[in-house]
Image (spheres, rainbow, N blue to C red):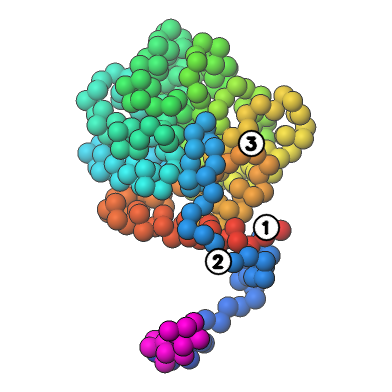
Amino acid sequence: MNHLEKISNDPTAAERKQDHIQLAFQSQVESMLIDKRFAYEPMLAAHPSEQLETRTFLGKQIQTPIWVSSMTGGTEKAYHINANLARACKTFGMGMGLGSCRSLLESNERLQDFDFRKIIGDDLPFYANIGIAQLEILTKENKIHLIDELVDKLAADGIIIHVNPLQEWLQPEGDKITLAPIKTLQHFLDKTTQKVIVKEVGQGFGKESLRALVQLPIQAIEFAAHGGTNFSMLELLRSDAQNLASYKALTQIGHSAEEMTLFINELKTELGSSFICNEFIISGGIKNFLDGYYLMEKLHANSVYGQASALLHYAEKSYEEVEQFLHHQIEGLKLAKAFFKVK
């Protein structure tokens, strides 16, 4: 059967046309809902191929520019979640940041909740994680070697330092930060050979904080911008009603991923050769592949986009649900690259 015969004998044609009639009115899209970030160019490309283009990120080859942002660890449910996410990273060629590994600095009791190198494999980025408050304590007590031991026991590529002064302040069990985080970080970098990623926890970084960070010899910065999971708000929700009412306004301060993208582009121009951190994980309020694609195209640096709560939603259920979600993300990215030009 030739191609024309195949078309004329399509057994689904009548049913499909009936669907088109029934759904036509439901498919009307008001012009005010047009996504103004993109120009749609249907004439300039064919349907995309099966795979995204491989790229180098954090010194390793990744197939998919999606990062599993740090989420959880140290609980019974965390093992199930993280195992599903690590398996998905292996399947789709993605990188992964663990949730806070603080408990492993003192005990290996919950090691299985974090020990996923054997699942993700040796060829993909995989990073441990501790907070700036814990790093301050370790540097003051000359115990930085514990970070080396943590990275070694997890066979990780390096360490993520999450910077969270508002979260620590609002957390009933929080630690007091007595030094500016940039000073703690500088002291650590002077004494370590570890690859370091620095991230926020849901409110992002202002331009001057980014200015300080991009001039340090760190591997990458993760935005963790305002608009996604906000750990300051999370702590308030764990608190009492009076605390929530008193401090909720604090959670409304921060920077979006788009704003931070503009900050980085401005700083690259302003700092010139002093700008030495050139890899970024765009996260915080990234709802779908269009958000990720848009900001990766806008950022003048090597980047991937990160998701946490969106992945957590599916990872809690099953690996199959995570796999299906990521499959749709990747297919959407391929279509965006083929047909959507960022304005």
Q: Which residue is mark 2?
A: 47
Q: Which residue is mark 1?
A: 342
Mark 1 or 2: in front is: 2
Where residue 211 appears, x then y in whole percent? 68, 29
Where residue 229 appears, x then y in whole percent? 45, 46
The structure residue drawn at horizontal position 48% and vertical position 19%, both measured from the top left corner, is 194
Q: Can residue 265 be seen by looking at this rendering?
A: yes
Determine the secondary structure under disc 2.
loop
The structure residue drawn at horizontal position 51% and vertical position 52%, both measured from the top left corner, is 52
Q: Is residue 254 left or right of residue 83?
A: right
Where residue 343 appears, x then y in whole percent? 71, 58
Where residue 118 appears, x then y in whole percent? 30, 33
- Along the line of sight, which residue is nearer the eye, 272 or 232? 272
Q: Which residue is mark 3?
A: 206
Which amino acid does the dot numbered 2 rest on?
His
Dot 1 or dot 2, earlier in sequence: 2
Which residue is situated farthest in the top direction here? 142
Q: Which residues are magenta?
A: 1-14
Determine the secondary structure under disc 1.
strand
Check the image and report above or below for 336 versus 43.
above
Q: Is residue 283 left or right of residue 138?
A: right
Dot 3 or dot 1, earlier in sequence: 3
- Along the line of sight, which residue is nearer the eye, 140 or 187? 187
